[in-house]
Amino acid sequence: STAKKPVQKELSNMPPPLPLLEESTKSTADTTDASTSLPSIFVSIASYRDSEICPTLDSLFANAKHPDRVFVGAVLQNDATNIDRDNVRLTQKYANHSNVRCLELAAKHALGPCYARSLAQSLHRGETYFLQIDSHMRFRRNWDDYLIGLWQQTTNQENSAGKVVLTAYPAGYELPNKIPNEERGILLVPWKFDENGMLRQRGRLLKKDSSTEHPIAIRCHLYAAGFNFGPASMIQDVPYDPKLDFLFFGEELSMAVRLYTHGYDLYAPPVSVLYHLWSRAHRPTLQSSPSSVPPEQIEEKKVGSRKIVQEQLLGQSPAGMFGLGDKRSAEDFAKALKVDFHKSIIHDGASESGLSNERFVNTADAASLFAEDSFEKKIATLDTKAQDLIEFFLSGMDLDQKK
């Protein structure tokens, strides 16, 4: 059946539609969905007690050039005592939607994002492309055509045998639909090592490339779990590990090194494609909600999951479905990233990812990416020394609670 486009309100400040690249109109006979002449997209969403899941789907379908080819696999982790807020609107609105598949899980049994994203991947039914997003997003018009076109353009230019993944931290929106008129892209770069020895990453806002009408994607080596797009072969080649329980900081690094060693190359779109709600004030978090897992076991599982990731980064991960690949080494990944994981050192030039510093927007302008009540917003306008000092004093806090 035809996917109807929901009406969205308060979007007068939306950036202009994304350009339609020539490559987005091209398709091959063996990679198209049977119900359409266009390549199809599977959208993976893991939602934890999030009232924004329904508006996210509204925006997803409303702003797609071809909503018929967009198929959603959503894992809804909800609190049965709070069902009205969590997902009743979604189940009523999309219950009979042929393009939406859902799995429901009691929130108290949630084990973190990796388990939920693994479940969401199990809902893939042969679609051509794979898009993973968070449950609180807004989209620019033509996002589907643009991502397919940019992916094909990048694949053709880099001769990468189709192993290209587009990924970035999106700019932020505010509730209910306050979307910034922000079109510039964001590049992921190394930031610092935290108190657990885990590399943290951050997004750097890029200046608009005025040298060409359709700027190309930008090579990077880090992965954003809340926005990544590539061929559906990613699900078979580098599936999410469902055993990385309660892993938050480390999820993205694990996927980055695994994708790299399996021969996948990561690129940042040169423009903003979608927007993310960075504030968590509207929803409960897993860390603040009751769990069926005792607290001491949660901490034990966290430590075990971090150890697995650290072994992957040091090239000590055993082979297997959820381990490293054999196309490139973890050592090659570290060199490309300009990071020493053995000594927890970030080398000079890592924060530019091969670009000149003039390609990036200054810190004060980049502060507009974050929600007003977010931790990042509070420190983004400070100078580097002040930011480092604040991080030092907050180093004993639970980093999940700072946000």
Image (cartoon, rainbow, N blue to C red):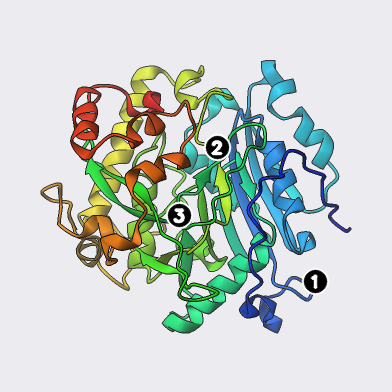
Label of residue 36 in the image: 1
Q: Residues within 10 Å of mark 2 (few under 14, many from 20)?
A: many
Tell me whether circle 1 and circle 3 mark residues in contact (CB < 8 Å): no
Q: In front here: 132 or 143? A: 143
Q: How far apart are marks 1 and 3 (CA)?
A: 29 Å
Image vertical order of residue 305 relative to residue 373, above or below: below
Can you say which quadrant of the picture contains the C terminus? top left
**185 relative position to 41: left or right:** left
Q: Who's the residue at 19% across and 29% down the image?
A: 389
Image quadrant assignment for residue 243: top left
Relative to residue 13, is residue 78 depicted above or below? above
* Residue 362, x across and y down, in percent: 33, 49
Q: Mark 3 points at which residue?
A: 168
Determine contact: label 3, label 2, CB under 8 Å. no
N-term mark: 1 or 3:
1
Q: Which residue is drawn at 49% across and 33% down?
A: 371
Q: Which mark is first along the chain, 2 or 3?
A: 3
Q: Where is residue 388 in the image (x, y as percent from the top left)?
A: 20, 34
